[in-house]
Image (spheres, helix red, strand yellow):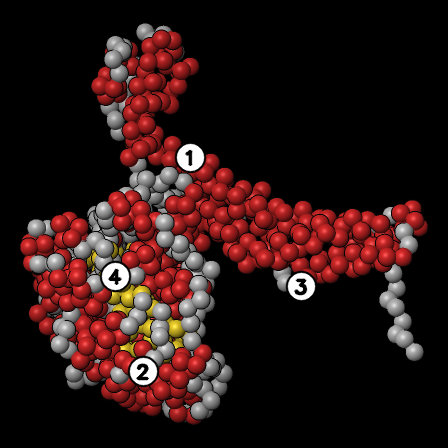
Amino acid sequence: MTAPRAALPDVATARAVVAGADALAALLATLSAAPGTAREQVRAAFGDSREEKVLARLDTVDVATLRDVTRERLRLGALADAGVRTVGEVARLGRDGLEKVPGIGPQTATHLLAAAEQVARAVRESLRFRIDLTPTDPVATALVQALHTLDQADAAVARYGDQVRGTLAEHERVRDDALVAASGPRRLLAWGERRRRAFDAVTTLAGLAERARATGLAEEARRVTALLAEPARPYDAWEDFRRRSAAYYALLDGVAPTGRDLAAAEGHLPAELVDRVQTQALDETLLRVSLRGYQAFGARFALAQRRVVLGDEMGLGKTVQAIAVLAHLVARGATHALVVCPASVLENWVRELRAHADLAVHAVHGEDRDAAARAWHSQGGVAVVTFAGLRRAGHETFAAAAPAALVVDEAHYVKNPLAKRSVAVAALAATTGHVVLLTGTPMENHVAEFRALLGYLQPALAARLDPAHGAAGPETFRRAVAPAYLRRNAEDVLEELPELVQVDEWERFGPVDGAAYREAVAAGSFMAMRRAAFAVEHAQDSAKLRRLVEIAREATENGRKVVVFSFFRDVVDAAARALGDLALPPLTGSVPARTRQAVVDDFTAAEVPRVLVSQIDVGGVGLNLQAASVVVLCEPQTKPTTEAQAVARAHRMGQVETVQVHRLLTADSVDEHLLRLLGTKARLFDAYARRSALAEELAGAVDVSEASLARAVVDAERARLFVDPAVTSVEDAPVEGAPVEDAPVDDAPRDPSRPT
């Protein structure tokens, strides 16, 4: 007995299916064209915003300047008598307004406007465009809304592009057949194969619509196409811009003439080398992050030149550029790649790789390093190993997988070619096609060190390099090593961003600091858990202290002053000891107010960059620390406003440099709980960028020093470490519900001015 055949759709049903499929096809066609439409909207909004900025600049130009740009004799006295003082006012008056000024006729008005346009053209060509954080400005808001729409359109097409193209092609293929089933007369005349195709076509169209609904394509298409007609609410668009300004600027750079300093973004490389780099393909299909123009150039440089030193100043995203190189190579067929780095940044590399690219990542470190190495060999992906791990395992272990690329972070660690870790890196580099050495240290100040690094990459070029190249200045040095060295400074390429770059520095406990943390958890001390990462006798035993010293040294070598904040007096003392001669006397609650200001004055006046270490409740309020352009937060604070106020000591009016904020965080610890519970990563940027009562209310809405919440964090960590072996990370640990066991919790805020 055969199964009953599904009932054929009646005419009305078939007609409804075809109509629905036609509507879906029209919607998807609009979605497919949405990025192009959105780009046109961005160009129009950019033009309006740029003209507003040009007029604002013209408002500062004296009207007498018009005499200098034209051969015509202009009656400027009539303008002065009418109270017209600037070129901007002339432009705003226009022809009709000028002709109403006594003494100015049509011919003079024409000459005045022509001269004003010449000045405007010069301003327009020299303008380095930035989006100011002015949500009350309708012109700036329109540009941010247009960029938000473009961002959403690009994301939707990137996610659903294949399905959109397939759906449209299938719709076009079967629609004519489906129309037969949707028409009574045509259905009656159709027999045999034609009738079967007609009903199959209706089934196909119904399936396309169902799949579009099930995958979320239909809903996403409606949402994105609606944005073309009615953009996101101003508040939502500005909020997204505040959190993801780099992505917005990356979009804008690709659409509009923003006046970027291209020579600086290209590292002032020779023209022929720039041309070679610009023609290098960069496959971004595996990337989950939008690259800034200068970052894409850096990745292309590394791919085109194959064996290079990327020496961008810290804060410019060397890690992301290296990830882009790896993602390109894997997308083009590479199976294995390797990252070698200090232990202090290994956790950061693992997180950044997983967050920014669709790549398999293997941390060859710790107790599971052998298993991770085997998985990398057999499965491929990116292995991340420390210098010590590479030396211990032997470079042959990794070379056996024939990695397509080697990235070496903090490359100045291998500047001594006789050191064992340098020998291991050099041997691995010799057998690897693409090698990228990352360092934020300005190499032109260390020619001998750079020659050693260059020897791992391009020995012939290294042999031609001598100290005279460094002595002749940065430009001469960079020209000499251009085939292998690219460096950009923050001020050259980040001039349009809000002057704040936040970097989360994730570390992992070692044996000593880890033991201190477990002891604090066992004791149920919330405050001891927060500062356990620094509870060591020797700085080398603390992952956070090691990273702090690295950040401070690199910053000071780049001519930047650093301020370090902690809530705890003992952490301040430990940081000052670890920094040694780099640090000024620390600011603590026991330092009188007058002396505090004297220390800040010394810090500000110091010709050689120094580091100021301070308790956050001392230096974070009331003191002007704008001499610092690098801020290090030793641990998450219990209130986002506390961190925001501390950062605002450096990030304030009068600050002329990009401020970099480094937050020292330890994985699988109280730090992750604080970030997860408070959502500080998002709120902090709001607090930094927004100056409103609402921001203060939101940021201070939750205080984790409350006894109940502190107890929940302690209980969760005790469960993870001592009670439930199935709980292996803070993501698994509960933070609500009954306490794990009845034990005292040190949940009272400690007096920051009192030694512990």
- C-beta proximity under 8 Å, tags 4 and 2: no
Q: Secondary structure at mark 4?
A: strand
Q: Is 154 situated left or right of 274 in this image?
A: right
First of labels 1, 3 by sequence position: 1
For label 3, the crowd category at 10 Å Cα-Cα, with few meaning under 14, some 14 to 19 and many 20 or more, is few
The answer to whether residue 469 is seen in the rendering is yes
The residue under label 3 is which amino acid type?
A: Ala
Residue beneath label 1, please?
47
First of labels 4, 2 by sequence position: 4
Q: Is residue 515 above or below residue 480?
A: below
Residue beneath label 2, please?
397
Label 2, label 1: how far apart the Cα atoms are: 56 Å
First of labels 4, 1 by sequence position: 1
Q: Secondary structure at mark 1?
A: helix
The residue under label 2 is which amino acid type?
A: Thr
Residue beneath label 4, please?
308
Res. 720 mark: none
For label 1, the crowd category at 10 Å Cα-Cα, with few meaning under 14, some 14 to 19 and many 20 or more, is some
Please name whichever residue, 477 or 238, is drawn nearer the observer in this view of the structure: 477
The residue under label 4 is which amino acid type?
A: Val
Looking at the rendered image, the quarter that the N terminus falls into is bottom right
The answer to whether residue 676 is seen in the rendering is no
Label 2, label 3: how far apart the Cα atoms are: 47 Å
Residue beneath label 3, please?
214
Which numbered mark, 2 or 1, is in the foreground of this view? Answer: 2
Q: Where residue 631 sits: x, y (%)?
A: 23, 62
Which numbered mark, 2 or 3, is in the foreground of this view? Answer: 2
